[in-house]
Amino acid sequence: MTKARDLANIISGGFTADDIPNIDASKITTGTITPSDNTVTNTKIVDSTIQLAKLSATGTKDATTFLRGDNTFAEAGGGIEEADIFRFTTNKADSAQQPLSGSWERVDDASFAKIGTGMTESSGVFTFPSTGLYYVIFTTTGYAINNGCDARILGTVDNGSNWDILAQAKIGEDSGWYWNATINSYFNCTDTSNRKVRFDITLGADTDMYGSTTENSTYANFIRLGDSQ
């Protein structure tokens, strides 16, 4: 502003170009002032005014997601997403090594609840609802008269063309006692079409395996621990 012009002159004669500070005309549009780059500080922004639509981050922006350091929205995760129990409902006796099939049911006690979609069973073969690293636990109960029991968890990565023993329990052959065996294994399911598990049982002569529709006697637990590796 020109120093020669005093207030009286400005009032009487109005403003001239010399009275206006140095302002870049390109920064002014109708009703809008555009600040120069990197000149707006945090204190100039009204609190609670930046909305999600103004963020460049990708992914679903809602109450179930959070903003990650790589500028993407993702579900928090970290919790168990799948947990299920199936039990064998009938007794078996004097059987050679064979898959347990034909009498599986999801636990249906009034207090039971699964997490997630749950497992699918067909002819004794269990299919996982999603990929992930699963904790598989098999428990069997029975009575040995003359011989013992052999219980196994088996897994396949080629839809049943080949089966691999993942865990095994051998119960002794003494007679006249009740037995209970629990075996477990991790199973890395990277493909729900081909990677599956089953449970086999061998019972010696005069040896019974117990099943039940009202309680867990011979049963399998499936818990998804996290993403597949």
Image (tube, rainbow, N blue to C red):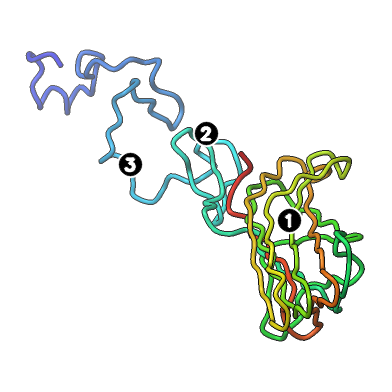
| Residue found at x 83% / y 44% | 193
In primary-sequence order, the first of circles 2 and 3 is 3
- Tell me the distance, in whole angstroms, between the alpha carbons under discs 2 and 3: 18 Å
7 or 206: nearer the viewer: 206
190 or 172: nearer the viewer: 172
Amino acid on which the number 3 mark rests in the picture:
Ile
In primary-sequence order, the first of circles 1 and 3 is 3
Q: Quadrant of the C terminus?
A: top right
Q: Which residue is mark 2?
A: 56
223 or 45: nearer the viewer: 223
- The dot on residue 202 is none
Secondary structure of the residue carrying tag 1 is strand
Secondary structure of the residue carrying tag 2 is loop
Question: On the image, which quarter does residue 59 sit in?
Answer: top right
In front: label 1 or label 2? 1
Q: Residue 97: horizontal and vertical position, in percent?
A: 85, 59
Q: Which residue is mark 1?
A: 153
The crowd level at tag 3 (other Cα within 10 Å; few <14, some 14-19, many 20+) is few
Q: Which residue is mark 3?
A: 45
Does residue 135 sit above or below 145 in this rendering? Answer: above
The crowd level at tag 1 (other Cα within 10 Å; few <14, some 14-19, many 20+) is many
Q: Are marks 1 and 2 in contact (CB under 8 Å)?
A: no
- Tell me the distance, in whole angstroms, between the alpha carbons under discs 1 and 3: 61 Å
Amino acid on which the number 2 mark rests in the picture:
Ser
Question: On the image, which quarter does residue 214 sit in?
Answer: bottom right
| Residue found at x 81% / y 73% | 88
Q: Residue 20: horizontal and vertical position, in percent?
A: 23, 19
| Residue found at x 29% / y 17% | 23
- Tell me the distance, in whole angstroms, between the alpha carbons under discs 1 and 2: 48 Å
Amino acid on which the number 1 mark rests in the picture:
Ile
Q: Quadrant of the N terminus?
A: top left
